[in-house]
Amino acid sequence: MISSKITGTGAFIPSVKKENKEFLKEDFLNEDGSSFNAKNDEIIEKFKAITGIEERRYAKPELNTSDLAYLASKKAIEDANVNAEELDYIILAHNFGDVKQGAIQSDILPSLATRVKYKLGIENPNCVAYDILFGCPGWVEGVIQAQAFIKAGIAKKCLVIGAETLSRVVDKFDRDSMIFSDGAGACIVEATEENDSGILSHATQTFAKEEAYYLFYGESFNKQADKDIRYIKMLGRKIYEFALINVPKAMKIALDKSGVSIDDVKKVFIHQANEKMDEQIIKRFFRLYKKKVPKDIMPMSIHKLGNSSVATVPTLLDLVKKGEIENHEINKGDVVIFASVGAGMNLNAIVYKY
């Protein structure tokens, strides 16, 4: 039976670093436009305590989301040692397309996946390139789709990318702007006959009855700002509560499908949204099996890289694989879980064996 295996990874981490102290002069406002009672240093300290974010990365002005995606893809292709002309699919997860520095429009014509194919110089017309809009879980879902193509026998090699430049869609008057960052991560998913490794199982869910607009496009908190310009907005408390209840359950669905014991899970690569939230999700997941959280189960990159949406999980995977996250490594035979939650509200999980 054919399985699907990640044979190479790559990431592009932007070089522009923005530390928390650089937000001290910002004019943060409440949703109604009123000023906070607290001073900025107090806001930033509380923000760091909850999210774990100390600094984040922004793309240089001349680089757009598709550029970051291309740069991460090149590394993944090289790491997997594959010929780009042999790729059957390029699946690119993002949320806002190419947003040029200072622009107010998103550009997705042509698709970002097509732009990456163009930049890679791929001539093969049978290499199908398309974008996926699935919120922060987009890269994980792209890997699930690649596996579906492989199992269906219509693909052997797929490039899956998660890329975003969230710094260009944030409202500087909204303190949530400190969460978001830019980046890109990519991987090659290939068909393999090694049935004891690769993707073992997965689960995906969309909650939209009450949760659809927990993340949305909204006006600036500055009431004097242009009403026609929209920014990424979120209902933070609702997302936090939603994630704590539902992500552990989805992870359990995926793990139970795999037949793997919770005791055999070595790492959980979870979307880097909020350190405290992620810690609680993992704690609740293990509690579903009446287990305590093992030491060093959850690598984190949010402290230095912030939340780059679809890029967080593939970037984190690449960093661990390349030995760049202290006290974390992946060895042959290790079972890991990829999990994410975001706009939609969508969530998903993959159980994977190396």
Image (cartoon, rainbow, N blue to C red):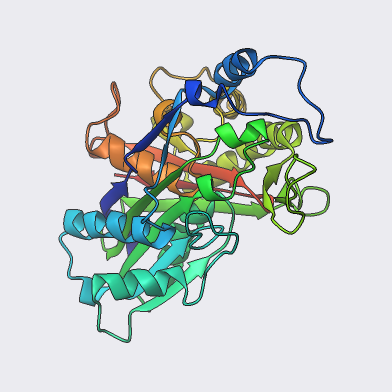
* Residue visible at 37% across and 48% down in the picture: 60
- Residue at the image position 29 percent from the left and 21 percent from the top: 327
Is the N terminus in the top left, top right, bottom left or bottom right quadrant?
A: bottom left
Q: Is residue 353 left or right of residue 220?
A: left
Q: Is residue 311 above or below residue 78?
A: above
Image point (42%, 66%), residue name: 91
Q: How many marks?
A: 0
Q: Is residue 197 above or below residue 272?
A: below
Residue situated in front as seen by the camera: 14 or 203: 14
Between residue 255 and residue 243, name the one nearer to us. Answer: 243
The answer to whether residue 287 shows anywhere in this view is: yes
Q: Nearer the viewer, residue 11 or 68?
A: 68
Question: Given the current orientation, which residue lies at the most extreme front position?
Answer: 224
Q: Can see residue 152?
A: no
The x, y position of residue 334, in whole percent, is 31, 36
Quadrant location of residue 266? top left
Left or right: residue 218 compared with residue 279 = right
Relative vertical location of residue 294 with respect to residue 246 in this rendering, above or below: above
Residue 347 lies, in percent from the top left, at 61, 48
Q: Is residue 168 left or right of residue 329?
A: right
Q: Residue furthest bottom?
A: 125
Provide residue 252's location: percent of width, then percent of height: 58, 39
Q: The C terminus appears in which quarter of the rendering?
A: top left
Give coordinates of residue 45: x percent, y percent. 58, 14
